[in-house]
Structure formats: C-alpha cells, structure tokens
Amino acid sequence: MNVEIVRVAKGRVKWSDAGSQEYLKRIHLWKVTETTIKPVHRGEVVERRASESEDVRKRLKPTDRVIVLDERGEQVSSETFADWMQTSMNEGIKRVVFVIGGPFGHDPSLRQEAWKVLGFSPLVLNHELVRVVLSEQLYRASTIILGGSYHH
C-alpha cells in the first residue's frame, strides 16, 4: 500500500522538512510520498478553501482512501490509527491519502467526501506541525502493525 501526504503549504520549512523526513525514512511498511499544493492568496476565504480543495481533488484517484486532517475531526488513539491503516491494507486499498489544509482549512465538501476526518487536537495547529505529527504517527502505526518496540 502507498501513502500520500497532500498538503496545502508554501513548502521548504527546514524544521518541518527535517522532522517529517526523520520519521518517514524509518517506515518500511509503506511507500510514503508528499505533494505540496501552493495556497491560494486571492479572494474571499470561502473561495480560497474551495479552490485549494479542488486542487487536492485533481490529485486524487477514485480508488484512493482519503483521510482529511482537521481540528474538528475524530481524535483517536495511536492503536486506532494503526487499525485504520491495517484495515486499509486488509481491504486491498492501493493508496491512502492524508490531506493537510492550508491557512483557512478545507472546504466542507472535502471533509464530507473523505473516508475519515482526523483531528490531532481541538486546537488549531500549524500545518507544518501537523505534518510532523502525522509523519510520526505513520511511523508509530507501522511499528504497531509490525510488532516493533517503538510504541511502548
């Protein structure tokens, strides 16, 4: 199974790049790639969200399992997160796509279309910080699935 992280961001943030890559390089269970979509800087907030969400949709395949990250999303344990990934593998999903929104979040329609909406905190977190946390949780999930010692 492949994992894609699609994020709406400027890109090239050294601390986030370093933190994310540190965890992603440790993952041997899945091939993980990242795609950066530039944020929209013009128009009303609702239009920006809609445009960015449409840019995300252009990168999705009908067979993708999409998990949107949003502060209103379900907050789960690392074990439950690992179960989501294991379930996706067991069901033969070819690609799980995690979507990190830009400064104004996601268009509501993208959240509705997603398989899951995941929240790491009820706090609004910087999208670069979310990227690092997601990378760490993907690594943690892979070790839970494989029975490694990283998780406890």
Image (spheres, helix red, strand yellow):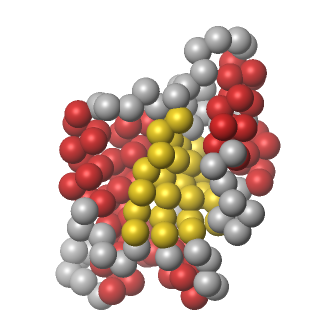
Q: Nearer the viewer, residue 39 or 145?
A: 39
Is residue 21 shown above or below 104? below
Q: Residue at x 71, y 29 (%)?
A: 51
* Residue 23 relative to residue 65: left or right: left
* Residue 148 relative to residue 92: left or right: left
Q: Residue at x 65, y 65 (%)?
A: 64
Is residue 1 shown above or below 25? below
Q: Is the C terminus in the top left, top right, bottom left or bottom right quadrant?
A: bottom left
Quarter occupied by residue 65: bottom right
Q: Is residue 34 visible?
A: yes
Q: Nearer the viewer, residue 9 or 119?
A: 9
Quarter occupied by residue 14: top left
Quarter occupied by residue 151: bottom left
Q: Residue at x 29, y 50 (%)?
A: 20
Q: Nearer the viewer, residue 130 or 66?
A: 66
Is residue 94 shown above or below 96? below
Q: Is residue 124 visible?
A: no
Percent position of residue 9, x then y: 47, 31
Percent position of residue 31, x then y: 40, 69
* Residue 65 relative to residue 84: left or right: right
